Amino acid sequence: MASPPWNPSTWRSKPIKQAPSYPEPEKLTKVVGELSRMPPLVHPNEILALKAHLRDVAQGRAFLLQGGDCAELFDYCEQGAIESKIKLLLQMSVVLIWGTNKRVVRIGRMAGQYAKPRSSPTEMHQGREIPSFRGDILNGYHVDERDIDPNRLTRAYHYSAATLNFIRASIASGIADLHRPLDWGLGHVRDPVLKEKYSLIAGSIQQTLRFLQAINSRPDELHTVELFTSHEGLLLDYEEALTRRLLLDTPAATHAQQAYYDSSAHFIWIGDRTRQLDHAHVEFFRGIANPIGVKVGPTTPPQDLLHLLRTLNPDREPGKITLITRYGASSVARLLPQHIRAVEDSEYRRCVVWQCDPMHGNTLSTPSGIKTRRFNDIYSELQESLRIHKEQGSYLGGVHLELTGDAVTECLGGSEGLAEDDLSTNYTSFCDPRLNEKQALELAFLVADHFSQ
Ligand code: PEP
Ligand code: MN
């Protein structure tokens, strides 16, 4: 059956969840007009390069690492914060390349992860009901800044552009040169066992590279790497304004290859709260040529998964869709196998990227009300997912993590053994708790060990 007509604004006729109501709609119209004239943040050639990499992931030839903050703040647009996140993603990829023996595709939750879905539109603050913080693209975290301000959409564009510019500059300047893995520094990793394990791997990679040099073989791609960007495509006014009908910039491009690209990021995903089949987010996402993600959780019936795939990827392009599964450590064994079977026994076999998000099914509150996650739960959901995919004959091709390069104390446990009392030492997240550098590296070792056995 032919798909109904689509354009970047057809989502407007559908019911929508999590949509803000702007106090001054005429201001929003002006801002959206401005954004529609701004240059694309990413190029269609890059978007298609990522899609080709993700096809390799879907078919088991590469591994996907995606990570960054839960809520990126405009304040994180700063040299140190950006650099430490890039370096952490690179350190993790060295471990993953070594363990999986495959290419690693890297996507940061960066340069645009500014919009947050919330379970309640308001929250209590000192006995007063105030609007919830919905991410820097809509309102501010500070209690005096909770009104929605459409001008923040333009600010989000500029902060994305500045962040992306620095990511590109750092990569072009050799931050990612795999010939110098030890220069990346181990930051806050103090654990001697972990440090030793990482140094051994980095050392053995260096040895291999020296050998390649000695025999005069220096593949260009070893000098630098690609780092793609992503965010939840929640705020459709913003995404629509940055969606352009573009022609691929290659001599061989034909008119038929003209397609709509959402130029706000290389990859965007639909969150767990907005993936209703007949709603606005699915409608918007079905028309863009970017590779896209869909969060899948305990409330996703297996049949919905097939409806989603048929709507979002009717041409069955391998790697077009990443299913980001997030059940919780205690539910994964019950729910993941039926989701795998629904997809892998259908016409979408080996067509999707299966990615484990071991964070979002494992959020809890301490008795004193601090939002946290147990490292053991995160570790165990990832371990279980690896085991189940192996058992089912499918390929777990990626991980999706909330992490930061800073030495935060937001998740309990890990090899530092963070306890409830330690959470207040350096808890700086404005949304969900993130893994620190050491906890993130530990997960990379878990995946590496699984594939190297
Ligand atoms: C998130 O990734 O920050 C998020 C809100 O996840 P989910 O949609 O899976 O709850
Ligand atoms: Mn989150």
Image (cartoon, rainbow, N blue to C red):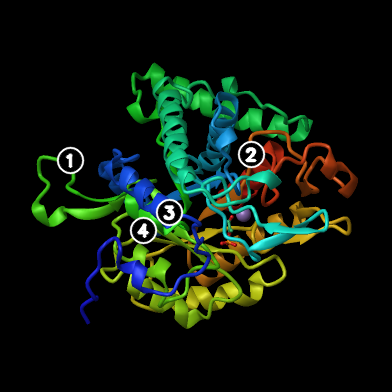
Viewer-side residue, 383 vs 34: 34
Viewer-side residue, 256 vs 121: 121
The residue labelled by disc 4 is: 319
Task: Say which amino acid is labelled 3.
Answer: Ile
Q: Earlier in the sequence, mark 1 or mark 4?
A: 1
- Residue 219 percent location from the top left of the image: 34, 27
The residue labelled by disc 2 is: 404
| Left or right of residue 311, residue 115 in this image | right
- The kind of secondary structure element at disc 2 is loop
Residues tagged 2 and 3 counted as in contact (Cβ below 8 A): no
The residue labelled by disc 1 is: 249
- Residue 322 percent location from the top left of the image: 44, 60
Q: Which of marks 3 and 4 is nearer the N terminus?
A: 3
Label 1 neighbour load within 10 Å: few <14, some 14-19, many 20+ = few
Viewer-side residue, 269 vs 137: 137
**Residue 104 in view of the camera:** no
Q: Which of marks 2 and 3 is nearer the N terminus?
A: 3
- The kind of secondary structure element at disc 4 is loop
Q: Work out how far the residue at label 3 is from the one at label 4, CA to CA, in angstroms.
A: 13 Å
**Residue 270 in view of the camera:** yes
- The kind of secondary structure element at disc 1 is loop
What residue do we see at 34% from left, 75% from top? Answer: 310
The residue labelled by disc 3 is: 268
Task: Say which amino acid is labelled 1.
Answer: Asp
| Left or right of residue 369, residue 27 in this image | left
Q: Is residue 203 above or below residue 152?
A: above
Please name which of the two marks, 1 or 4, marks the residue nearer to the observer.
1
